[in-house]
Amino acid sequence: MTLRHISRRLVISFVTLLSLLGSTFTSYADSTPNEGSTIIYDVYVSGYAITDKNKDSIKFPGIEGRVYYEAESHTLVFENATLTGHDSIGAFVFSKIEDLTIKFIGQNSVVDKGNLTSFVHSENKVTIVGDTLDILLDNETNYGLYVSQLSIKDATIKETLASTKSSVGFLSDSLSISNAKIITIVSGKGQAVVANASKIEIESTDMTIDIDSTASSYGFLCKGDVSVLNSAISGSIVGRGSDSNQLQSLFIQAEGLALNNSTVDIQTKSKNGGGYIGSNLLLNNSVWNMTSSETYNTTAIDVAEIALITNNSKVNIDINSDNISYALQSSLLKCDGSSIHCILKGKQCAVVYTDRAELNNALLQTEVVAQEMANGLQSDVLQISNSKIIEDISTDKEKEEASYDVIAAIFNTLSSTQNMIELNLKGNKCVGLTGKSADFKKDSIIISGKSTSDFMGISVNNNNFNTCNIQANIIANKNVHVSVSDTLISTNNNYQLDGIIGYTSSTGLSSKYLSMDNDHYFASIDSSTTAKSIVANVLEIAKSEINQNLFASKNAIGFNCDSLQIDSCSISQKINSDQQGIGISAKKLNVKESSFTHTTETHKSNYGIYASNGYLDNSNFNIVVDGTSAAAIVSDHLTINKCKAELYGSISAIPNCIPEFTGYDKLNILVNMENAPESATPWDSTISITNFMYVKISDGDVNSLQDTPSDNYYYTIGNTIYSNSGDIQVYSINGQFIGGGERVTVPCTGVYVIKQGLKVTKALVK
């Protein structure tokens, strides 16, 4: 199987972004309206320099409230101040010093609907502390805070930015926020909350973003790493542009993103969207919630290298797409003690797409509805342990194609231990688990669903089941295969294949080489054409219990093999077919120390065992067959040794005559009554079979008969059998008592069983 994957890694150029953001800041002159100044501190407010003469009470245009500068600590203080920009300035605060602290006391605000482009601009370091600042800017292009190294501590900042071109809340190379509350609302064209950063650190902070853009929109654009500790980030990103080539929304792009004890809750709506794109992702005891209610293409999490989700973290993704939606892409995904829950809708959907995925003590739950193609988990190497996988995947595709449109899991190699895997698949053509090699140990696997064409539950070239519970309930308009493989090794498993219905054909297990050891296997299989329970070139069953019911309008076969070996097993089956029903069909059949119960209701060809050659040894057989052409055992050369058998089959034209073994050369049956009680009758459960007699049958007619032992104790004349010495008992071929004495007349020609004391043989009455 191949996934029609389309990589959509969004790469944003910071240079391009900044060129779109537009104008440069105004250069400030080293001048001041206050006469007699002697020291200029390289800090400008409202376009004017702060000096030693005006620093204690700064009263420049656009300032209401108290503003002052503490020169020794390089601290600019705003106390319940209202700031208004004017046409001559670009930033309300401009700093040239290496390390400026801005402190807010009480409620402070910056309001400008003219030419003000930023509250603060600095090419160096700025630290913001204190109480509250509200920034309201509405002009062509603006930046809330434009600082090379920005640190915000113990403060509340609310930005409301509107522009006709572009807005950025924080334009900074290095951004650090701790113990703060940040609200950023931007609207206009080409919006971003944080841009051009090499490093972003957020700690003990509550951050809310709200972006409404008429073009592209971004949350965090970082050239380095984003670290979020003990914080909560929430909000929405909306892009409303009409040009699909330009319009996209992206929440976070960074080299690495680390969430520790934090929560991200984001909603996006745009033409092309993304949640996080970067090289590495760490979620530690954190929550990632992403909802995209309206988008064309979206990838929720796209990680180039390692995505680590650990320590009770939760990833919740809900995407409604018109085209392509991917939940999580990564080269390596590790989910340890955490959960991933994905709801995807779109034209093509994929939940997890990785080179290697490792799930330990994890929950992966998916709900996918696609128009054309839906995939759950795809990984080259897939390793799952102590986890729960729940996948509900469907498509509403109407056009039938050769490829499978619903695939729950695709892999090259799979290692699965002590997991619960539940797959419910609906579509045109469905496959549950497919790959080259798989090892299942102590797993519970449940596969159910419907397909309008074919349904394949498990398709693995080399597959091992060990101590697993495997359940399937599948309906398909064409063919159903519960499990298909080149090699299947099955040990200590419990199979419950109940309600396998394929209207063309249905098959339980199919493999070139299949080994079953100490398994319990139950199958109820139905088909309008062909129903087969277990199919293999070579099938070896040991110490297992097999129970199967097959229903078909044409052909039903319990075991269909080239070579079948059964050792120490209990097999019970019922076959109902309008045409042909066969319990065991094998070129070579070897049965040892087993029991086989077979009943059929078949209107035409009906056979219990249909084998070219082999042996039945130390086993019990109860075979009931019926129909116009029926036989309990059909074989070219089958040796039966020390078996207990009750064989009931239809008789040819006249009652008590030989069953129809049409077209086969030789049937070897060995009979010995040496240890049977006196009351025993041939073919009942007490018979031990050791002696040979050969019956050559061609086209339903007996041509010759060779009797053993050589010392014949009877002879025949016409329809009467005479004893050479003492009384004899005569039975029909299927155990009905005909008569006893020195001579017995039989009702018709055919083969009869003759007993005298402990001696038993068969006679042909011509």
Image: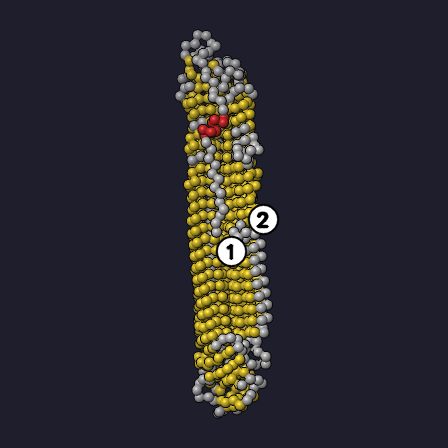
Indicate the position of residue 193 as horizontal and vertical percent values. Answer: 50, 30
Q: Give the residue at mark 2.
A: 396
At horizontal 47% and vertical 27% (from top left) the residue drawn is: 18
SS for dot 2: loop
Q: Is residue 446 at least partly visible in the picture?
A: no
Q: Which mark is residue 126?
A: none
Q: How crowded is mark 2: few (under 14 residues within 10 Å), some or many (20 or more)?
A: some
- Place of residue 126 in the rendered image (x, y in percent of width and height, measured from the top left): 43, 23
Amino acid type indicated by mark 2: Asp
Secondary structure under tag 1 reads: strand
Q: Which amino acid does label 1 sit on?
A: Gly
The residue lying at 47 percent from left, 9 percent from top is 34
Q: Picture quarter containing residue 148?
A: top left
- 660 or 310, nearer to the observer: 660
What residue would you read off at disc 1?
457
- Depth check: give the residue in front, 158 or 713: 713
Does residue 370 appear in the picture of this structure?
Answer: yes
Q: Which of marks 1 and 2 is nearer the N terminus?
A: 2
Q: Which residue is drawn at 49% across and 22% down?
A: 23
Residue closer to the observer: 651 or 157: 651
Q: With respect to residue 739, does 126 lie above or below?
A: above
The answer to whether residue 246 is above or below residue 733 is: above
- Where residue 664 appears, as percent x and y from the top left, is 49, 75
